Image (spheres, rainbow, N blue to C red):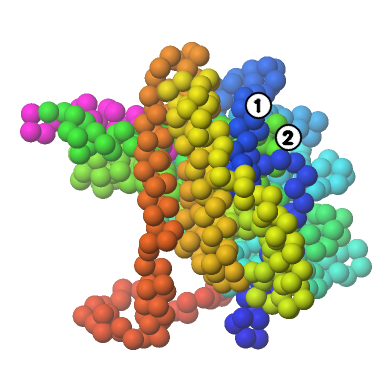
Amino acid sequence: MTEPTKYAESREVGEQAREKEWTRPSFAKQLFLGDFRLDLVHPAPTPPDEAAKRGEEFVRAVRRYLDAHVDPALIERTAQVPDDVVKGLAELGAFGITIKEEYGGLGLPYLYYCRTLMLVGSYCPALATLLSAHQSIGVPQPLKLFGTEEQKREFLPRCAAGEISAFLLTEPDVGSDPARLGTTAVRDGDDYVLDGMKLWTTNGVVADLLVVMARTGKKISAFIVEADSPGITVKRRNSFMGLRGIENGVTEFSQVRVPAKNLIGREGEGLKIALTTLNTGRLSLPATCAGNAKWAVKIAREWGNEREQWGRKVGRHEAVATKIAFIAASAYALEAVCELSSRLADDQRNDIRIEAALAKLYASELAYQVLDELVQMRGGRGYETAESLAARGERGVPAEQMLRDSRINRIFEGSSEIMHLMITREAVDAHLSAAGELINPEAGRQERAQALRRAGRFYAKWLPTLVAGTGNLPTSYADFGPLAAHLRFVERTSRKLARSTFYGMSRWQSRLEHKQSFLGRIVDIGAELFAMTAVCLKAEEDAKDLGRRPYELADTFCHQARRRVDELFDRLWDNSDSHDVRLANYVLEGRYTFVEEGILDPSIEGPWIGTPSGGENVRRKIT
């Protein structure tokens, strides 16, 4: 099969798995179209009082438990979460936070699920990963959305009680391209028989229940699989640069029989189930990122006041002060993005597929920058491990660990590059509906002619709306006080963003989908506008109790974000993309191997993509 054919097949598989209908409004979708619908998010929906009370009580209980029973340094040192910690969290209900009470869970809003993960993630990111992988992409979420009543009653109480679940999609040769999926499920009477290999199965080493994606014929389906079924072997437990306490493995299926009643949804709906699950499942990552950033503020404040250089506290030197301002403003904004997204998920009046994806992309990128700046601010102590610091008599601040742990967030549940492409596809859906055949390289002359007429009607109505709006009126959004100017900027810039998208489509047409750097910048601008909106909403709400202080944080963040937006717009049209692509092709062709001379490669010999062979089953049961 040729490379273009493979690409077309992969694109088609992904397109078939998309939710194609927009039955509910979407703030972010309209934002990319130049329509700043503040009414969709303001006032931000709030959970009922009773649910909020239970949620606050639960977060406090988790905080007390972490403080009394969890030693994050021990988990980092031993690379394992103690069994008694897992069981203690299960007794609190931490494995069934969003599972309905009728199925044995706590039935709390996503807002408190995310606040719990924010708390846990600030203390022990590996533990937050255990909880989120179980609930966000493991058995509970897909069953909640697609499971039968029988499946819910059979499996959800087990999940809520602490039986750990894992999600198995990735394979040694399959990452973000599910068209290459090799694991198969063949119907045999009342069962399916599974064969294949899954890689990076977070929680897979200790899981009791698995969600497995497997090919049924030409399409992909989702199954609930008992982890102790005959024929399942956990070939190894993987080790990583960070998150050392996670139980991530390689799982092999050999003639594993799965009851047909364990099929989630219908045959061929597996990828749709996975993508829909991630619409809300991705919210766990912004929560842990916000927790990391909020912790960084505390350390930056304390260290900035403690350390002195050249007769002044380091936090008073401008070079460090700018870092502190970035850390604090970003942390407040990340919490705002997380809270707004989770509230919208609870409210269920909006389609949040773009909002959740933006939150994941933005939070994972910005939180990593925050932690990197914290390490820089701490200097040599930032690079030193917490245990080493403590051993020589200083406070054991795990800044380098937090940086290592957070790095995976830019890869987990869709790498930043894949998130850019996915968000772009959703954000330009209205354009593709109107003019899709114009930019479809496979469209015929008649199809393109019809698309041209359809596009003409759409753009005749749409383009005039991008000329002027409320952002041009100096009195708009006055209720937001000192932040009104920033919301006017968001409104004006959303229209500029929509015009830029249109110009890109007009310029490159069928080549647009390959202009990934351009599209990535379009998404990044939208993400900044979404974050600015969220932080303004949060500041207005918080100011009722906290006075001007939230406005100060939000104002500084918005000024920082506006500079980033301006730079991204400049780079839409003034960049080195074409030169970079040409040079990269030359590198791949071996034109510059002389650059590699004078070095030795410390890599351990082996195939680039392989599978483990031999060895015993390393699966273990939490006891």
In the picture, the quarter occupied by the N terminus is bottom right
The residue range painted magenta reads 292-311
Along the line of sight, which residue is nearer the eye, 435 or 404? 435
Q: Residue at x 41, y 52 (%)?
A: 568
Dot 2: element? loop
Residue 103's label in the rendered image is: none
Residue that badge 1 annotates: 45
Which image quadrant for residue 332? top left
> Do tag 2 and tag 1 residues touch (Cβ < 8 Å)?
yes
Which image quadrant for residue 62? top right
Q: Residue at x 40, y 17 (%)?
A: 548
Q: Please give left or right for residue 151 compared with residue 603 in the image.
A: right
Spatial CA span between label 2 and label 1: 10 Å
Along the line of sight, which residue is nearer the eye, 75 or 434? 434
Dot 1: element? loop
In the picture, the quarter occupied by the C terminus is top right
Q: Residue at x 42, y 61 (%)?
A: 573
Residue that badge 2 annotates: 349
